[in-house]
Amino acid sequence: MNEKYDTYAVAIIIAFGSLIIGGLMAATLAFGSRDGFLFALGAAASAWLAGYAMFFDRARGFIALTALSVAMTIGAIILLIKL
């Protein structure tokens, strides 16, 4: 484990996994968009795993999981807007 990335990994897990995407999950539940909720849940799980990829110094996995999280977040926002 690389010690200089630990702080950034924890920040990614907290910021994306719980605050930003958690709010998106709550919004999609409030408006009744089940598909949007599942996209937001997938984005949160992907962002959560990206933090662990950074913990274990897996750069390609981190980039792939972060890109997947961003794509799923955009998908959830598009589904939320279409309501």
Image: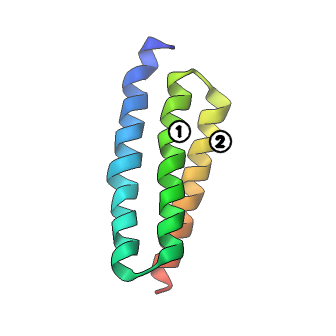
Looking at numbered disc 2 in the image, what kind of residue is underneath it?
Ala
What is the spatial separation of the Cα atoms under label 2 and label 1, in whole angstroms? 10 Å
Q: Which residue corresponds to mark 2?
A: 64
What crowding class fits label 1: few (fewer than 14 Cα within 10 Å), some (14-19), or many (20 or more)? many
Q: In this view, does 23 lie above or below 3?
A: below
Looking at numbered disc 1 in the image, what kind of residue is underneath it?
Leu
Nearer mark to the viewer, of 2 and 1: 1
Give residue 28's quadrant in the image.
bottom left
Q: In this view, does 71 lie above or below 27?
A: above
Q: Residue at the bottom extreme?
A: 83
Q: In this view, does 63 lie to the left or right of 17?
A: right
What crowding class fits label 2: few (fewer than 14 Cα within 10 Å), some (14-19), or many (20 or more)? some
Q: Which residue corresponds to mark 1?
A: 49
**Residue 68 location (% of width, % of height):** 61, 51
Residue 26 numbered mark, or none = none
Q: Is residue 12 left or right of residue 19?
A: right
Q: Residue at coordinates 51% horizontally, 14% vertically from top-left?
A: 1
**Residue 45 location (% of width, % of height):** 50, 48
